[in-house]
Structure formats: C-alpha cells, structure tokens
Image (cartoon, rainbow, N blue to C red):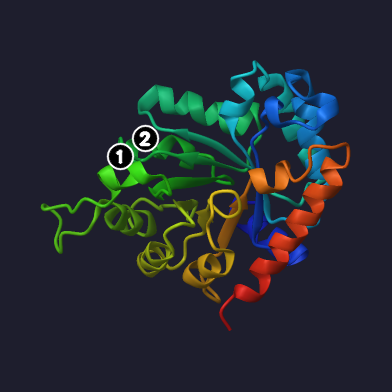
Amino acid sequence: MKFMSKLQAAERLNDSLLCVGLDPDPAKFPTHWKGDAGRIYDFCAAIVDATKDLVSSYKPQIAYFAAHRAEDQLEQLMAHIKRNAPHVPVILDAKRGDIGATAEQYAREAFERYQADAVTLSPFMGRDSVEPYLRYADKGAFLLCRTSNPGGDDWQMQRLADVPGQPRLFEHLAALAQGDWNVNGQLGLVVGATYPKEIERVRGLAPTLPLLIPGVGAQGGDAAATVAAGWRKDAGTVIVNSSRAVLYASAGEDFAAAARRVALATRDALRPAKPA
C-alpha cells in the first residue's frame, strides 16, 4: 500500500489525526528503567502497544536512537510496529538533506534498512536532494517548510526578490511541493503548531498535501487551532504530532497506561476541532 493511502486508512480506522513521536530519552524513562539505554526498544514498544488504536502514525526520531548506539533497537522497533500495528504508517524523522549518491544512501537507510513508510527531509539543497526518495513509489517524504523553532525565522520568513510576488521562502517551498516537485504525489510538508496563521497560509498554497505538525503538547501548540488552520474536508490531511507529553506521562511502572490516557485525550481533543 502506498504511504498516502495507508495514512488515510489509519486515520479513518482509528478516527485519529494524532501522531505519537517516539523520542526515547533514557534519562526520562520510568524509575525501574531510568538511564538504561538498553531498554529503548522495550520502552518504545510498550508505548506502541498502548496506543496503536489511537494514532494515525508514529514518528521515531533517529537521533534519539543513534546517540545511544541503538540503531539495532530502532530496527527492532520498526519490525515490531509492522508486526503488531501493521495498519499504522511510520514516518522516520531524520531531516536528511544531501544530493546525488549520498541522498540515495540516505533513502536506502530510511526505506530499506528501517522499512519506514515516509521520511522527513531538509529541502535546503533543492529538488535533486529530494528526488532519490521519490524513486520509492510507495513511500512518502515530508519537507521542512515552516518550523516551530525561533531560529526558523532566519531563513523561512525571508522574502525572495527574484520570485514573482516576492513570497517568503516557506511560501515558495509550499508552492513548489504542491506543484513541480510533487511528481508522484508523495510529498508532504512540516509546519509547526506554534504558528497557526502560517499553517493556514501553507494549506492555501498546498491544498492537497498532508501537513505534519509538531509542537502540540510539551511545546505548547494549541490542538484546536492547529487542526482548524490545516484540516480541510476532501483535501490534504493533517498529522498532529505529540511526543514528550505522551511518552513521559508517568515516571512509574504505569507509564504505558499513562501514555494511553494522554494519547486518548489528545486524539479526542483533535477530533472535534475539524471544521464542519
């Protein structure tokens, strides 16, 4: 099944716009596993098992695994999700951005080694840095567009004097992703939840693309405003990510049950926020 179809199917089946980000930090693990990087797989697998009927996707952040030499545990986790939640797509949060043969290797890493359904990319180096990922016809790619970090303004809000209308960089990127770059209908965009007005602007420029929206929960993004800004009936969906608020809902042995409660509450908060 192609990524976009799998995403839509999971959204319908679980009646959910929620993506749970899998950012395992052993220093924040429950007391009985605290500080033990050898438990990264166990921790994440427990979160998956507790939330697999509540989400439209999962988003493991590769740095949280690589920093602890836990890439093998990431492979285990990806296999666990395929086996125990086969209906839920996995977006590998890698933010890769390179050209030519190097991009081809990153694409192999994401889609062949880790078996991800989609990947996040930095488009700063241009179209040829994205194309190797699009050769995997059943996969998706989310381009960083308007990120939630304060430094995003340094580039993303600058106007382009050489482009008609002098759009801001993030606006130009959204238009490219909706148009010429999206040859096989595989692209989506990353837009931070802390900028609902800009989510709305991106949606206007890219009406059919899925929007991956981090920043709800611990980062302070408003769930209702996020969905209202980005969701349109019969258009591209929104994928609203929450990581720390779900993962670290409890520091006790009930961490998985607590994660489920937060995920359920977040899913239910997102659901009625869809515009009629």
Locate residue 11, reporting x and y percent.
Answer: 69, 62
Residue labelled with disc 1 = 126
Q: Which of 57 and 216 is in front in this view?
A: 216
Residue at 65 percent of width and 30 percent of height: 114
The C terminus - image quarter:
bottom right
Q: Residue furthest bottom?
A: 276
Circle 1 packing at 10 Å, graded few (<14), some (14-19), many (20+), is some
Q: Mark 2 points at which residue?
A: 129
Q: Is mark 2 on a helix, strand or loop?
A: helix
Query: Which residue is found at the position 81% from the left and 52% from the top?
Result: 260
Tell me the distance, in whole angstroms, between the alpha carbons under discs 1 and 2.
6 Å
**Residue at the limit of the structure toward the right, as seen here:** 253
Q: Position of residue 154 (x, y in %)?
A: 26, 43
Q: Which disc number belongs to residue 210?
A: none
Disc 1 + disc 2, Cβ < 8 Å: yes
- Left or right of 158? Residue 10 is right
Q: Which residue is found at the position 59% from the left and 57% from the top?
A: 240
* 101, above or below 182, in the image: above
Image: 72 above or below 241: above
Q: Is mark 1 on a helix, strand or loop?
A: loop
Instruction: Tell me where residue 190 appears, x and y as whole percent.
Output: 46, 51
Give amino acid for label 2: Ser
Residue 52, can we see it?
Answer: no
Residue 264, compared with residue 169, is above or below; it is below
Query: In the image, is 220 to the left or to the right of 14?
Result: left
